[in-house]
Image (tube, rainbow, N blue to C red):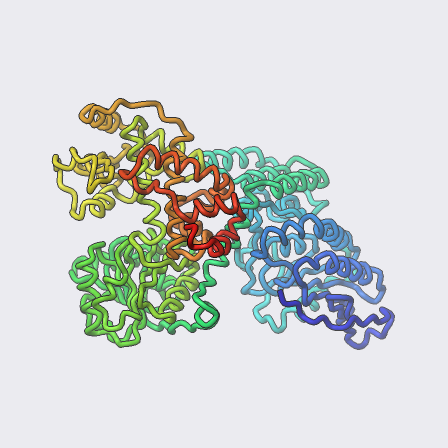
Amino acid sequence: MVFHNYKKPIYLSRNRSINLTLRFFIAMWNYNVKQNVAVLSVENVQNKLYIKTFAELLKNVKAAEENTQVAAIVLCISDDLFSYGEGESSLTYRISHAYPIIKKVIHALESCRKPVVAALLENAKGEHLEIALSCHYRTALKTTKLGLPQVKHGLIPGLGGTQRLPRLIGLPTAIEWIVHGNEFSAEMAVSIGLVDKVFSSSAEAVDRAVVFAHNLAGVFPEHRVLRNCFMKDAAKGEQLITKYMSALSTKNEKAWSIYMCLQTTYAASFLSFEEGLKKESEALQFLISSAQFRALQYVNESEILASRWKFSDKFNYQTVEPVQVRKAAVIGLGTMGSGIAIAVARIGIPVYVMEFNEEVLKERAELIYSTIRRMSLRKEITETMCNSMISGIVPISDYSMLKDVDLVIEAVFELISLKKEVFSNLNAVCKSTAILASNTSQLDIDDIASVARDPGKVVGMHFFAPSHRMKLLENVYGTYTSYQTISTAMHIGSLMGKVSVLVGNCHGFVGNRMYLHYVTESEFLLEEGAYPEQIDTILKEFGFTMGRFEVADLSGNDVIYTVRNGSHPQKNHGRRHRERVRNGIRYCPLADILVESGRYGHKTDGKGWFKYVDRVPYVDENITQMIKSYRESHDITPRTIHSEEVLHRMLYCMINEGFKILEEGMASSPNDIDMVWLHGYGWPKSTGGPMYHAFTVGLPRVLQVIEQRWHMAGSSEPHWEPSNMLVELVKCHGNPNINKWMGLYKTIPKSSL
């Protein structure tokens, strides 16, 4: 870590003439006096120097309050004070060592007998906003974003935010801010009374805040001290918490921080301010010692690391410039392609959208425009952005229009022959510098690139539906994909606000390669005695928002059918029903039977593994009977299957495959695998991801279960063959820290593998 050089401290008398602007330094704080207003601003804060930083701030606040020639105070709050993504150890240190002195600063600001104005110079999130709440007034820039995101880090606001915010903006809005942890605009903050003034120019922000504070001088704003404020809508507290608890139960929410945020904020409606602070402190201490907090810190660090791709010191995210994409195109306007077009347009890139049938093109284009208009109505985008996105999406049905695009994303049906045909046609019209991306979810990028004029310009960009909302983007590099092409794909994903994970070219890449085994084991469990509702309930109790069979009904059981069988569904195709072994490998045809009976899921009148009424799943006796009949026809005696077995078989087979992916170099770290599963497949965030889950369970225990399954199943279930990497890590190191797996594996002598 690089530490900046600090300015040498200069201590000056506070009695120096105030006709001139005074500037002197106390440690890391600048102390200026302008128009009888003390201006406090910070610079050069480094990790784990919080105690010294805030001790000096406390001195400055007291000095300004005692100085008879200072009538008001402006505290400049910028991103320098705190930063997220530093890691668990830094955040833990901050809370345990620095929070006590920060609380003293907050008390001094709130109790100061002179008006204190918080000038929010950049974004005001988390502790920045909590400190601002202790000031009597707040100003912000028009571009400032505000929020309390601690819940996303497995914590709650711990500096009085759960008690002050509801007293300022009301309990319903405060719960919305604190429980969801989202960020809001300065305009929104003004409308709810959180911010008093908004300035357009960052260059004049401090001076304008000084003028604002100067006009407040001379009157102590007793009514602006939040600790003394009465919460007007306190009577709504019980009704609100009942509503939120019901919603959390419906979502099967497992994150403790969400419940703690809700309970401590609700407590502000019936406890005194001091009692509320005590409850907040107790909740924070509980969370910071929890396994969920450690998992969420790992997740936050992993999201940052995912974007920092690296092949060598020469070729990495810092050294390789992406291609500037001025125009783009999306070919194929199904659900996926339409969403991709919206995502591209949202980042301000004009995009051609292509279908070959004019009627289909017109219909799909109008659906895209309708989706964008709904986004505007829901305030997800401004009306100006809505109009810009719609005008930037140009429907075409002829390849000739693509001659000047910089990026083409192909999103046609998942057939290799069709995709290669598209890429061959692109060769004829696109300029030589254009990047050609395929949205394939599993096909060989090198095979697709084989028909391209320049295979170095070909990359996989695997979006997840709905692609304008889902955060994951799997970028897949082939044998010949250039570093600049990789850099461009990663950059576009970043602009879209996605967690972009770079992966190697193998069947199914990372996510679907692991998901295949997850699906396979669920169907084997049906054969042996379980039912869809039992398996889905167990998965949701573990933390998944939806069970495996609900997900299949939502995405369409016919999609997996086509991938597995290489053809579209055919009703009552009896031959496949007898196959329980394919190419020497165990196979379960239950999903084929389901699809061939016309039950695709939501798209077929709500009939799939479940029957749906208003999109709510219910057990369908027809499915129960189908499974029973299948067992009888194959002389399978059902047995009782417990929750532990379901989780072991469905999760540990994926973990084993994850280790194989790592040892093959298809993913650069376990962190990347976990990001794929968290943001693309709904793995519960509070457990960190499948690889982190293996670490918390303990690699020796995970390997023991895998070896037991391999011994029972043998070669007919090759997905249970233990990964060499997992075996050797356990053999040589037991259960090493997840961040050390890759380094330790490289040190193991090849002769022992």
Give how far across and how far down residue 445 sits, in percent.
28, 61
Residue 473 appearing in the image: no
Q: Residue at x 33, y 67 (%)?
A: 481
Looking at the rendered structure, the number of numbered marks drawn on it comes to 0
Residue 50 appears at what percent x and percent y?
A: 70, 57
Measured as percent of width and height from the top left, residue 106 is found at 72, 52
Which residue is at a point 73% across and 56% down the rendered structure image? 51
Position above or below: 80 against 610: below
Residue 188 visible? The answer is yes
* Residue drawn at point x = 65 percent, y = 41 percent: 285
Question: Eyeballing the image, is 417 above or below 614?
Answer: below
Residue 190 falls in image quadrant: bottom right
Relative placement, left or right, of 741 versus 618 is: right
Q: Is residue 52 left or right of residue 672?
A: right
Q: Considering depth in this image, is 164 or 496 the residue closer to the camera? A: 496
Left or right of 20 on screen, residue 436? left
- Residue 106 located left or right of residue 679: right
Which residue is at a point 29% across and 30% down the rendered structure image?
526
Comparing 299 with 167, the one in front is 299
**x then y, percent, for residue 225:** 72, 50
Please, which residue is most extreme toward the front here? 751
Image quarter of residue 703: top left
Q: Nearer the viewer, residue 719 or 478?
A: 719
Q: Work out which quarter of the rendered image holds the N terminus and state it.
A: bottom right
